[in-house]
Image (tube, grey):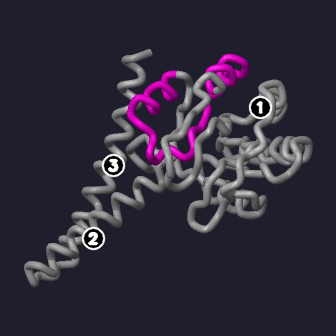
């Protein structure tokens, strides 16, 4: 990653497996999310503290999580509502582990929303003001630009839009293939270009929201 001329990170998301985290850190990954929300808070705290110490030896960052994010994506997760910890428990976890970023449950969900989500924006503000570290926004697909810019302004420095990127990729593929069938012209490089263009534009549109949030703040 040191030889890449653009500001990009290689992040391991939602990983409960310590051995995989070790392999990634030794391989030069920039950051990891040690997802131990299924453990009780005390054991999660103990292990996350160890992961932070390991990451520091490699110059990497750690994202922590104590509340599962609702929703199923890529066959992983649960549609059950997560148990929300108190602000005091979350702040204590952040301070004692020394994590660099925290993923709170604020009404967000992985995958596709079946209805407009009601988000607890104030919880992001409270956590940032109490700890001084940025928050991670999981389940970003389907949120409005207004929700994004408000949450970014409050301290969400990382937003996850995996589902949106997959949708952009697949919809561009479908549209291109339907056109190719209608025209009777099958050109794989043109398909790859259409896929790449759609994914890049989706990413750019979300990157622009960080600039909008900065101006709003």
Q: Is residue 182 visible?
A: yes
Residue indicated by mark 2: 174
In percent of the image, x 25 and y 57: which residue is there? 197
Q: Earlier in the sequence, mark 1 or mark 3?
A: 1
In the picture, residue 143 is in which quadrant? top left
Q: In whole angstroms, how far apart are the C-alphas of marks 1 and 3?
A: 32 Å
- What crowding class fits label 2: few (fewer than 14 Cα within 10 Å), some (14-19), or many (20 or more)? some
Q: Residue extending furthest left?
A: 183
Q: In whole angstroms, how far apart are the C-alphas of marks 2 and 3?
A: 16 Å
In the picture, residue 179 is in which quadrant? bottom left
Q: Residue extending furthest right?
A: 42
Q: In whole angstroms, how far apart are the C-alphas of marks 2 and 1?
A: 44 Å
x, y percent for residue 16: 75, 58
In the picture, residue 175 is in which quadrant? bottom left
What range is drawn magenta here? 124-153
- What crowding class fits label 1: few (fewer than 14 Cα within 10 Å), some (14-19), or many (20 or more)? many
| Helix, strand or loop for disc 1 | helix
Quarter placement of the C terminus: top left
Residue indicated by mark 1: 94
Above-or-below relation of 1 to 208: below
In the rendered structure, the answer to whether residue 135 lies left or right of residue 46 reads left
Q: Earlier in the sequence, mark 2 or mark 1?
A: 1
x, y percent for residue 51: 78, 47
Q: Is residue 26 visible?
A: no
Residue indicated by mark 3: 202
Which of the pair 22/37 is nearer the observer? 37
Mark 2 and mark 3 residues within 8 Å of each other at the beta carbon: no
> Is 127 a magenta residue?
yes
x, y percent for residue 98: 77, 33
């Amino acid at each position: 990653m040191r030889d890449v001329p653009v500001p990009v990170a290689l992040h391991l998301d939602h990983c409960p497996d310590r051995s995989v985290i070790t392999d990634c850190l030794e391989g030069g990954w920039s950051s990891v999310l040690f997802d131990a929300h299924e453990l009780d808070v005390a054991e999660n705290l103990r292990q996350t503290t160890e992961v932070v110490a390991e990451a520091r030896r490699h110059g990497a960052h750690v994202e922590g999580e104590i509340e599962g994010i609702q929703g199923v994506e890529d066959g992983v997760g649960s549609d059950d509502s997560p148990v929300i910890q108190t602000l005091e428990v979350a702040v204590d976890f952040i301070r004692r582990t020394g994590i660099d970023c925290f993923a709170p449950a604020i009404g967000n969900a992985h995958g596709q929303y079946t209805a407009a989500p009601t988000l607890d924006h104030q919880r992001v503000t409270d956590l940032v003001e109490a700890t001084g570290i940025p928050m991670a926004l999981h389940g970003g697909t389907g949120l409005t630009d207004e929700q994004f810019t408000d949450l970014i302004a409050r301290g969400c420095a990382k937003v996850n839009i995996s589902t949106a990127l997959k949708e952009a990729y697949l919809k561009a593929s479908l549209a291109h293939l339907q056109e190719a069938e209608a025209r009777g012209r099958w050109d794989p490089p043109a398909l790859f270009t259409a896929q790449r263009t759609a994914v890049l534009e989706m990413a750019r549109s979300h990157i622009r929201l960080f600039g909008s949030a900065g101006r709003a703040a």
